[in-house]
Image (cartoon, rainbow, N blue to C red):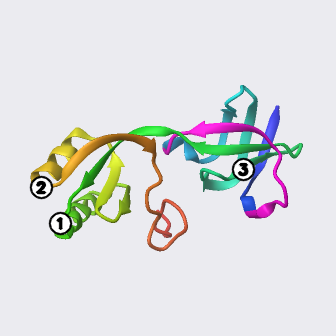
């Protein structure tokens, strides 16, 4: 069984020879130890020291040195937008109040599709459209990843 103990970034290399890719949803990109299968069928055991975000564009290094590039899968999301900054701020407040992950851009907020939240955002006056793209929400305020940097 192939094993992977390390994650690497593009900065770790002078040149990159990617062996394969693995396309993962947002939920599947937060792991510590799991049996995985690359896009071309190579099975390997991911066995990291701690639960880590597998960021799109980074690499899983197998114990034999082969590299598997991580790709974020497209997912069904919703994008709430408005020309009125105050509506965007109100939407962001309600999303944050519900502890929902989101991507924040100028004039829009993107989050996972949820018909109840979609209705709430539309009731606030935001225009909500369904989009399919990789989901890369904001990290925590005190950390470099999905959590806020404190222990639960």
Question: Does the magenta portion include 5?
Answer: no
The image quadrant of residue 34 is top right
Q: Which of these two is toward me, 4 or 135?
A: 135
Instruction: List x then y, in percent, for residue 144.
Output: 55, 67
Name the residue rendered at 83%, 46% in the picture: 17
Instruction: List x then y, in percent, for residue 23.
Output: 60, 37
Distance, label 3 to label 2, CA atoms, is: 41 Å
| Quadrant containing the N terminus in the rendered view | top right
User: What SS does tag 3 mark?
Assistant: strand
Relative vertical location of residue 103 with respect to residue 135 in this rendering, above or below? below
Mark 2, Cα crowd under 10 Å, few <14 / some 14-19 / many 20+, is some
Instruction: List x then y, in percent, for residue 119.
Output: 15, 44
Instruction: List x then y, in percent, for residue 24.
Output: 57, 39
CB of mark 1 within 8 Å of CB of mark 3?
no
CB of mark 1 within 8 Å of CB of mark 2?
yes
- Residue under label 3: 59
Distance, label 1 to label 2, CA atoms, is: 10 Å
Name the residue rendered at 68%, 34% in the picture: 35
Relative vertical location of residue 4 with respect to residue 93 in this rendering, above or below? above
Q: In screen coordinates, is 15 left or right of 69?
A: right
Q: Which of these two is toward me, 95 or 67?
A: 67
Mark toward the start of the polypeptide (1 vs 2): 1
Segment colored magenta: 11-26
Name the residue rendered at 52%, 39% in the picture: 73
- Residue under label 1: 84
- Residue under label 2: 125
Mark toward the start of the polypeptide (3 vs 2): 3
Q: In screen coordinates, is 61 left or right of 120?
A: right
């Amino acid at each position: 069984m192939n094993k992977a103990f390390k994650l690497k970034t593009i900065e770790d290399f002078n040149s990159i020879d990617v062996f394969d890719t693995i396309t993962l949803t947002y939920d599947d990109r937060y792991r510590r130890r799991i049996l995985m299968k690359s896009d071309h069928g190579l099975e390997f055991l991911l066995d990291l020291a701690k639960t880590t975000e597998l960021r799109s564009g980074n690499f899983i290094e197998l114990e034999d040195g082969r590299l598997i590039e991580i790709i974020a899968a497209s997912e069904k999301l919703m994008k709430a937008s408005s020309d009125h900054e105050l509506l965007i701020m109100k939407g962001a407040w309600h999303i944050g109040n519900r502890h929902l992950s989101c991507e924040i851009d100028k004039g829009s907020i993107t989050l996972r599709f949820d018909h109840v939240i979609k209705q709430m955002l539309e009731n606030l006056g935001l225009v909500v459209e369904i989009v399919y793209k990789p989901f890369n929400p904001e990290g925590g305020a005190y950390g470099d990843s999905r959590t806020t940097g404190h222990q639960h």
